[in-house]
Image (cartoon, helix red, strand yellow):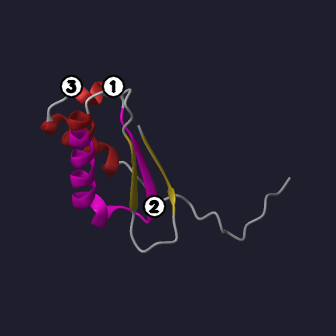
């Protein structure tokens, strides 16, 4: 799962949640986190200024690194800039 929201920073920021429910083995959880960081590092230049949260599911634990990277690359490529929340427009009835 991937969630994101705009931030005031110069570049995108990454947050991750890889819980023990994904895998009880720390080695496996850390492997997933390394893959997420690497994909984010490569895509960061094309991403809008946003806070991105990646939440790993149980299915991620059994996937090879190539499959994880491919899926993450596809998800990161789908991120579009959100409309500015600071617009001066008002709602009309």
Taking depth in this image into account, of 11 and 28 the one nearest to the observer is 28
**Cα distance between the residues tagged 3 and 1:** 8 Å
Dividing the picture into quarters, in which one does residue 62 lie?
A: top left
Provide the residue designation for mark 2. Answer: 50
Q: Which residues are magenta?
A: 30-56
Percent coordinates x, y for residue 38 in the rendering: 21, 53
Vertical arrangement, residue 44 with respect to residue 72, above or below: below
Percent coordinates x, y for residue 92 in the rendering: 82, 57
Provide the residue designation for mark 1. Answer: 58
Element on which disc 1 rests: helix
Vertical arrangement, residue 62 with respect to residue 67, above or below: above
Provide the residue designation for mark 3. Answer: 62
Element on which disc 2 rests: strand
Percent coordinates x, y for residue 47 in the rendering: 35, 61
- State if disc 1 and disc 2 touch (CB < 8 Å): no
Vertical arrangement, residue 88 with respect to residue 51, above or below: below
Taking depth in this image into account, of 33 and 25 the one nearest to the observer is 25
Q: Main secondary structure of the magenta part?
A: helix
The quarter of the rendered structure image containing the N terminus is top left
Q: Does the segment drawn in magenta span residue 46?
A: yes
Q: Does the segment drawn in magenta span residue 57?
A: no
**Cα distance between the residues tagged 2 and 1:** 26 Å
Residue shown at the point (20%, 43%) measured from the top left:
69
Residue 39 numbered mark, or none: none
């Amino acid at each position: 799962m991937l969630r994101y929201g705009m931030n005031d920073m110069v570049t995108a920021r990454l947050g991750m949640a890889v819980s023990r429910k994904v895998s009880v083995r720390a080695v496996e959880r850390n492997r997933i986190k390394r893959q997420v960081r690497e994909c984010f590092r490569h895509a960061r230049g094309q991403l809008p200024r946003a806070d991105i949260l990646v939440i790993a599911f149980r299915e991620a634990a059994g996937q090879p690194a190539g499959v994880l990277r491919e899926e993450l690359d596809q998800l990161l490529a789908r991120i579009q800039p959100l409309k500015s929340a600071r617009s001066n427009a008002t709602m009309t009835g």
